[in-house]
Image (cartoon, grey):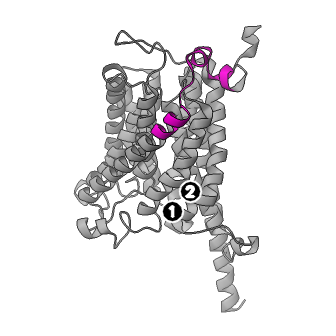
């Protein structure tokens, strides 16, 4: 075999290996959407379980179309309006599989919001809101950090010139989770609490329906998360064992701290694992494993404490606690990257606390403004909440005309 043929063979192997690598990542993160679904199914009452399942699947379908035609081109300047032969190109269609992988991130936005507004939101208006976020809002911020618009997350950006290094968000503590959690907050506030959640100013307990389903959702998310973080390398040659172990340690830190802080509450423990994983995304490639353990533990503590303050003191009816879990823990992850990613604390360095604070705050501003504008408009024009009767009989019957357990009604 001559040198040219050998080089071409090696290129083909590298290109096909990278496509397969991202495909496996996309499949793992896609499986996380089943985790979102079952986490919500287990957390809501029986009369709203079908709705939880249908919402997540429908949002996936709508997100795919929106991100393919609008969102991905906005974020990366790549359009798929070309013949299939050109799309495949000489690299086995890497841009196509890159789209699939990043779609699984984008579709997390409506999945995150779904848990906060569960049991009283209209189906179609929320579908429209999710479409807007995946097509426009999320890709806009994504482009600032990972994409074509040099402002926050690239060398030479405005922030890099200010802080010395750009904003660092390896796998989306801020770009995905913080954006999703802070987008959910306006919806939760505009919707208001579920019926009888607060009576005469006092919170009333609405029990979760199924801890096994909730636990299944948490496990599915935890397993898929290693695709979320590790495959953010983008190629086989960039894969890092440090990312895998840091993800593991942050998850474990979240479990242990939630176990202690919640006094062995099953729902908090399973969500504590997720809090740790959310917070580690930004700095998973630069933390020392001990630093990741601490970051994950602090994130779980934030979630346990803030969820109780939010629902009991602030009287914000956030059903799955998505604002503290994704919004605040995601913000913590962005800031923590600038602390525990430093060489002084055993990290690899190349991060700046100033850059991390600025980037994390920018996400909050973008999400809150966008969330309030979209939901206020939809509420004013169409209404975003079910009627009192529809809420009483449940979203399953009022929206989907079927119960999760129809044989029980016989």
- Determine the residue located farthest toward the left in the rendered image: 344
Task: Indicate which disc, 1 or 2, sits on the residue closer to the N terminus.
Answer: 1
Q: Is residue 268 left or right of residue 167?
A: right
Is 378 included in the stretch rendered in magenta?
Answer: yes
Q: Is residue 400 above or below residue 286?
A: above
Out of 57 and 172, give the one closest to the viewer. Answer: 57
At numbered mark 1, what does the secondary structure look like: helix, strand or loop?
helix
What residue is pinned by disc 1? 75
Span shown in magenta: 375-399
Q: Is residue 373 left or right of residue 362?
A: right
Q: Residues within 10 Å of mark 1 (few under 14, many from 20)?
A: many
Q: Can residue 321 be seen by looking at this rendering?
A: no
Residue 102 marker: 2
- Closer to the eye: label 1 or 2: 1
Q: Can residue 155 be seen by looking at this rendering?
A: yes
Q: CA distance from mark 1 to mark 2?
A: 10 Å
At numbered mark 2, what does the secondary structure look like: helix, strand or loop?
helix
Q: Is residue 240 above or below residue 295?
A: below
Can you give x and y, in whole percent of width and height, for residue 371 in the image?
44, 42
Can you give x and y, in whole percent of width and height, for residue 228 in the image?
52, 50
Q: Quadrant of residue 108?
A: top right
Can you give x and y, in whole percent of width and height, for residue 309 in the image?
31, 24
Q: Is residue 81 left or right of residue 162?
A: right
Out of 385 and 76, give the one closest to the viewer. Answer: 385
């Amino acid at each position: 075999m001559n040198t040219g043929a050998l080089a071409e063979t090696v290129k083909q192997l590298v290109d096909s290996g990278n496509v397969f690598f991202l495909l496996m990542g996309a499949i793992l993160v896609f499986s996380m959407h089943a985790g979102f679904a079952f986490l919500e199914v287990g957390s809501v009452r029986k009369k709203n379980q079908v709705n939880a399942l249908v919402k997540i699947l429908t949002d996936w379908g709508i997100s795919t179309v929106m991100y393919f035609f609008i969102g991905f081109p906005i974020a990366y300047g790549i359009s798929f309006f070309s013949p299939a032969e050109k799309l495949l190109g000489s690299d086995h269609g890497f841009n196509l599989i890159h789209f699939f992988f990043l779609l699984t991130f984008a579709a997390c936005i409506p999945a995150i919001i779904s848990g906060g507004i569960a049991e009283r939101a209209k189906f179609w208006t929320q579908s429209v809101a999710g479409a807007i976020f995946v097509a426009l809002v999320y890709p806009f911020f994504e482009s600032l950090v990972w994409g074509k618009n040099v402002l926050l997350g690239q060398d030479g950006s405005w922030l890099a010139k200010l802080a010395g290094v750009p904003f660092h968000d390896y796998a989306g503590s801020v770009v995905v989770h913080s954006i999703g959690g802070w987008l959910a907050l306006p919806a939760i506030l505009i919707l208001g609490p579920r019926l009888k959640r607060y009576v005469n100013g006092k919170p009333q307990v609405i029990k979760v329906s199924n801890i096994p389903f909730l636990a299944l959702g948490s496990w599915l998310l935890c397993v898929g998360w290693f695709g979320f973080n590790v495959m953010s390398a983008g190629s086989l040659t960039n894969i890092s064992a440090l990312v895998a172990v840091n993800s593991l340690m942050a998850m474990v830190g979240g479990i242990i701290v939630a176990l202690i802080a919640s006094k062995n509450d099953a729902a908090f423990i399973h969500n504590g694992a997720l809090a740790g994983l959310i917070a580690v995304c930004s700095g998973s490639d630069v933390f020392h494993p001990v630093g990741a353990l601490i970051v994950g533990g602090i994130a779980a503590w934030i979630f346990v404490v803030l969820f109780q303050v939010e629902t009991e003191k602030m009287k914000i009816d956030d059903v799955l606690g998505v604002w503290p879990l994704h919004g605040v823990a995601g913000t913590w992850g962005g800031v923590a990257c600038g602390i525990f990613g430093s060489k002084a604390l055993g990290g690899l360095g190349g991060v700046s606390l100033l850059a991390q604070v600025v980037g994390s705050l920018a996400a909050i501003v973008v999400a809150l403004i966008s969330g309030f504008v979209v939901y206020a408009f939809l509420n004013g024009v169409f209404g975003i909440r079910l009627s009192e009767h529809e809420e009483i009989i449940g979203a399953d019957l009022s929206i989907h005309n079927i119960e999760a357990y129809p044989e029980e009604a016989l």
